Amino acid sequence: MIIKNKPLLKWAGGKSSLNKIIEKYYINLKFDRYIEPFFGGGAVFFNIINKFNIEKRDLYINDANKDLIQLYKHIKSKSSSLIKEYEKVLQNYAGEKDYYRVRDLYNARDINISPLMRSSLLMLLNKTCFNGLYRVNSKGEFNVPVGRYANASFIKSEQISQLSKVLPPS
């Protein structure tokens, strides 16, 4: 069974629904290097690696959001530790009523949370905030309100493990 790689996160401006249209512009091209400067959720990137055989060393991803890039670095190089941390975060999450406590912890500057914890909190917030938005205020604090989901689709450890195998080296 071939597992298709797909975005882990919902991201504003995501291209998953547009991939069929976008790929018409590159499907007949031959290239051996891909650079993604605005990675976000990575929909175009994952579509390209599912269709082309590009060496990992010739794949490059970037984004202006440092926390997002840190998360992808953790997925790539510390996936087992990230999975354990994320599972702890999920176990302690009491649903919608707990959202703002998690958001406050993510924004906390006065306590020292580990980078792995911060990445785990980002994954949880992304799946529970309004429309998967990432927005910060003038203080740099994540300020998206809680989303209304009957059943939030949390990230599975298998997804993290799979992505760790296909993301390019940092």
Image (cartoon, helix red, strand yellow):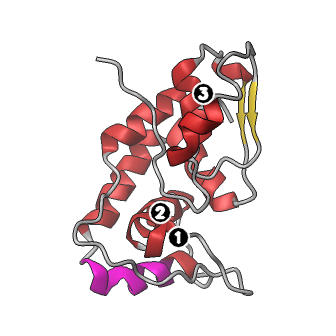
Q: Mark 1 touching mark 2, by CB under 8 A?
A: yes
Left or right: where 30 falls relative to 124: right
**Is 75 rendered above or below residue 84?**
above
Residue located 73% across and 12% down the image: 30
Alpha-carbon distance for marks 3 and 1?
35 Å
Which sits earlier in the primary sequence, circle 3 or circle 2?
Answer: 3
Q: Is residue 112 above or below residue 12?
A: below
Circle 1 packing at 10 Å, graded few (<14), some (14-19), many (20+), is few
> Where is residue 124 shown, x and y percent of the image?
40, 65
Q: Amino acid at mark 3?
A: Ile
Residue 22, x across and y down, in percent: 64, 37
- Which amino acid does the dot numbered 2 rest on? Met
Judging from the image, what secondary structure is the residue with disc 1 in?
loop
Q: Is residue 163 magenta?
A: no
Residue 18 appears in which quarter of the rendering?
top right
Residue 29: % across, % down:
73, 16
Pick whichever of labels 3 and 1 is earlier in the sequence.
3
Mark 1 and mark 2: Cα distance apart in space: 6 Å
User: Residue shown at 29%/87% (left/top)?
Assistant: 97
62, above or below 165, in the image: below
The x and y percentages for residue 114 are 53, 63
Identify the amino acid type marked 1: Ile
Give SS at disc 3.
helix
Q: Report the span colored magenta.
A: 95-105
* Residue pictured at 52% horizontal, 65% vertical: 118
Give the residue number, with chain letter if any, for mark 2: 117
Circle 3 sits on which residue?
48
